[in-house]
Image: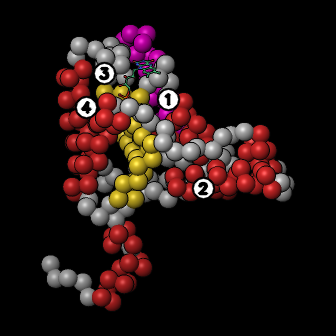
Amino acid sequence: MRPLKFTSLVVLTMIAPKAVFGEKILFIESSPRNEQSQSSKIANKFVKAYLKDHPKDTVDILNVWNEELPELNEDTLAAKDAIMNQVQPSAKQKEAWGKVAETFKRFASADKYIISVPVWDFGVPYKLKQYMDIITQPGLTPLESASSTKGQLTDKPVVLFHSSGDDYSVGSRAEDLNNRKKTFVRNWLKFIGFKDKDISEVSMKGALSPKAKENEQKALTEAEQLAATWGK
Ligand SMILES: Cc1cc2nc3c(=O)[nH]c(=O)nc-3n(C[C@H](O)[C@H](O)[C@H](O)COP(=O)(O)O)c2cc1C
């Protein structure tokens, strides 16, 4: 293929910047365990395989344990009420809201999303829940009921990397509890604007079971396979 002329490149940059600069992937990492983390290990395998085919794309890693996530305290919630009621927030409330808006801006600026989701007490790690609560805000995310802002996140693909200690054998009560956690995350994504068809999932079950190595291998293979078709 012949290299593009400078003028063609400038035009391409203006009309299709993603073709020139690649896409931005936000990797929301929810385990604090770094190298020990199963969910991160599988997600990282996926990232490596994906970037091989998409060398222009960039990955912004946001580990919810390393970020100074704003608190949803009295000032932030008062600012939220003020926005919802179309009332001017106080200076203090505005400042608190600014941090929420900043966190949301980083989230919304991505083209694709990877989220690692370890199961903690049949739910998600509390820092991930804090992050979810921060970015689910009126005027920021296109909540299902707020039609005026609908559409900001639609058509963006997202992949969830679940991990659990238990193997949640099929048909057990524990399996039902694990599924509830997955449904919770999926419903949240749909609530803020993602479509069901754009949500993929890879699960590493039984990280603390005798079959841990075998399960890990299965999940790693699944992650690599998904990377070959993700977002196409
Ligand atoms: C606070 C805490 C709570 C946990 N709760 C559960 C649980 O309810 N069910 C389960 O199967 N495993 C549970 N585990 C085990 C983790 O899900 C498992 O070790 C998983 O691999 C953690 O993900 P990570 O390796 O990416 O950190 C829990 C672990 C921690 C630290």
Q: Alpha-carbon neighbours of circle 4 within 10 Å: few (<14), some, or many (≥20)?
A: many
Most common secondary structure along the magenta stretch:
helix
- Secondary structure beneath dot 1 equals loop
Is disc 1's CB within 8 Å of ligand 1? yes
Residue 229 shows in this picture: no
In terms of sequence position, does the residue under pointer 3 or pointer 2 come before the other?
2
- Secondary structure beneath dot 4 equals helix
Is disc 3's CB within 8 Å of ligand 1? yes
Q: Where is residue 166 in the image (x, y as percent from the top left)?
A: 35, 16
The quarter of the rendered structure image containing the N terminus is: bottom left
Q: Please, is residue 53 above or below residue 129 in the view?
A: below
Residue 82 shows in this picture: yes
- Front: mark 3 or 4: 3
Q: Position of residue 209 (x, y in %)?
A: 28, 14
Q: Do the residues labelled 1 and 2 touch (CB within 8 Å)?
A: no
User: Tag 4: residue type?
Assistant: Ala
Pointer 2: what residue?
Answer: 102
Q: Are marks 3 and 4 in contact (CB under 8 Å)?
A: no
Task: Residue at 41%, 49% (x, y): give it.
Answer: 61
- The answer to which of 227 and 93 lies nearer the viewer is 93
Q: Give the range drawn in magenta.
A: 171-188
Is disc 4's CB within 8 Å of ligand 1? no
Residue 207 is tagged as 3
Task: Residue at 52%, 55% (x, y): give it.
Answer: 106
Left or right side of 207 for 64: right
Residue 219 is tagged as 4
Q: Where is residue 6 in the image (x, y as percent from the top left)?
A: 30, 88
* Residue closest to the far top: 172
User: Tag 3: residue type?
Assistant: Ala
Q: How far apart are marks 1 and 2 (CA)?
A: 22 Å
